[in-house]
Structure formats: C-alpha cells, structure tokens
Amino acid sequence: MVTHVVCWKVKEEVDGLDKAGILAKLKSVLEDLPGQIEDILSLNVGINEKEADTASDIVLLSSFADWEALSRYQVHPAHQEVVAFVKEIATERRVVDFEE
C-alpha cells in the first residue's frame, strides 16, 4: 500500500473567501474525491487546530493499492480540478509518499 500525504498553507483571502472559508472548501472538494476516483482506498483531511510557525493549515492523508494507482489518481480529471483550485489558494505545499 502507498500512502500519500500533502500539507498546505493557504492564503488569508481568495475571491471573497476568508481563510476559514478557503479551508472548508478545500476540505470539501478533497473529501468528494473518493466518490469520483476508484483508486483511492482511504482519504482523510484535517484542518490544523493549533497555531504554530511551523504548522501547515490543512493535511491530506490518502492511500492507494500501489504506485500505479497513485499515478492514475494524480492525472485523473477530478483530481486535476482540485489541483487547479489549490494553485489559486496555496502559499506552500509539502508532499510525502511512502510504501508500507
């Protein structure tokens, strides 16, 4: 199994949405992905609750059967729609992919 972890910091405001609104929208669109992409075995999204200089704002934890499934997910049109949104709202992105 492959675990895909992504952490983001987001802007304070985008298109009339404040930071809380941005995070809620990102959480929602990410949580919709398992219904659209069959390669996702599990997906959890968490919004940071404790402020720290080193903290990210939101994290995605997802798992896939193998590296090929992760690759299919990454190019899937539904995922690419989320990627386009993230490019508008994110100020920082960090990724860790590992096999268990």
Image (spheres, rainbow, N blue to C red):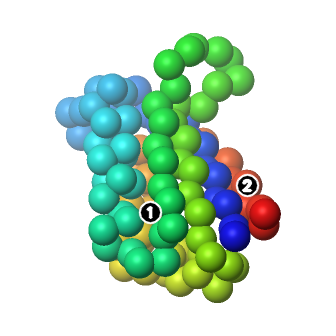
Position of the N terminus, as image quadrant, is bottom right
What is the crowding at mark 2: few (fewer than 14 residues within 10 Å), some, or many (at least 20)? few
Depth check, front residue: 92 or 27? 27
User: Residue 40 appears at what percent x and percent y?
Assistant: 48, 70
User: Residue 54 appears at what percent x and percent y?
Assistant: 71, 23
Query: Which residue corresponds to the image point at 50% horizontal and 19% vertical from the top-left?
Result: 49
Q: Which residue is mark 1?
A: 83
Single out the residue that lies furthest toward the left.
16
Q: Secondary structure at mark 2?
A: strand
Check the image and report above or below for 70 versus 16: below
User: Residue 39 appears at what percent x and percent y?
Assistant: 49, 77
Query: What number is the disc on residue 96?
Result: 2
Task: Indicate left or right for 13 with 100 as reference.
Answer: left
Q: Closer to us: mark 1 or mark 2?
A: 2
Query: Which residue corresponds to the image point at 62% horizontal and 76% vertical from the top-left?
Result: 65
Hey, what amino acid is under mark 1? Answer: Val
Q: Is residue 47 visible?
A: yes
Hey, what amino acid is under mark 2? Answer: Val
Query: Which residue corresponds to the image point at 53% horizontal and 83% vertical from the top-left?
Result: 72
Position of the C terminus, as image quadrant, is bottom right
Query: Which residue corresponds to the image point at 64% horizontal and 15% vertical from the top-left?
Result: 52
Quadrant in which residue 79 is drawn: bottom left
What is the crowding at mark 1: few (fewer than 14 residues within 10 Å), some, or many (at least 20)? some
Check the image and report above or below for 67 versus 86: below
Quadrant in which residue 21 is drawn: top left
Check the image and report above or below for 50 versus 13: above
User: Residue 23 appears at what percent x and percent y?
Assistant: 37, 35
Task: Indicate left or right for 1 with 36 as reference.
Answer: right
Which of pointers 1 and 2 lies earlier in the amino acid sequence?
1
Contact, mark 1 vs mark 2 (Cβ under 8 Å): no
Q: Secondary structure at mark 1?
A: helix
Quote the CA–CA distance across marks 1 and 2.
16 Å
